Amino acid sequence: MDTTVEHQVRELEARRYAAAAAGDWDSYAELCHPDLVYTHSNAVVDTLDEYLAKARDGYYVYHRIEHPIDRILVSGDTAVVIGEMNALITAGGVGKTLANRCAAVWVREGGRWLLLAYQPTPKT
């Protein structure tokens, strides 16, 4: 495994979650591929623009996020992050505690790693 790529992707994941927790949606957007598919744990699917519009309008407010990473799989210009996303959020005015397993897909384009897809699944 390319530990340099693994380190880069690990740092990008940390920046992504930190931006969400801080409500810094411009920084979050910079990390995302324009074709991002963001699937929520309730099976709602958003494009990048849809997700950012909701987040910027305060539909999603992240109060606390923990994101332990189990492993990062790298194949060419694709990296898949397997881990968890545990958070306290407000979604649509309703407080929620999230406990998810998740997969994040990053692709390298033009020398930059960008988040292409995100899929959390509730732990039961």
Image (spheres, rainbow, N blue to C red):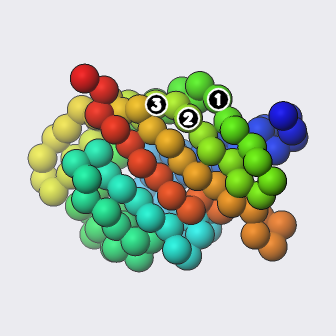
Q: Secondary structure at mark 1?
A: strand
x and y percent of residue 26 in the render? 53, 68
x and y percent of residue 75 in the render? 76, 48
x and y percent of residue 8 in the render? 77, 45
Front: mark 3 or 2: 2
Relative to 79, say whether 51 is above or below. below
Q: CA distance from mark 1 to mark 2?
A: 5 Å
The residue carrying mark 3 is 84
Q: CA distance from mark 3 to mark 2?
A: 7 Å
Residue name at image x 81 percent, y 44 percent? 5
Q: CA distance from mark 1 to mark 3?
A: 11 Å
Relative to 13, say whether 65 is above or below. above
Relative to 53, say whether 19 is above or below. above
Relative to 87, say whether 51 is above or below. below
Residue name at image x 44 percent, y 64 percent? 37
The residue carrying mark 1 is 71
Other residues around mark 3 within 10 Å, as few (<14) / some (14–19) / many (≥20):
many
The residue carrying mark 2 is 82
Q: Nearer the viewer, residue 109 or 97?
A: 109
Other residues around mark 1 within 10 Å, as few (<14) / some (14–19) / many (≥20):
few
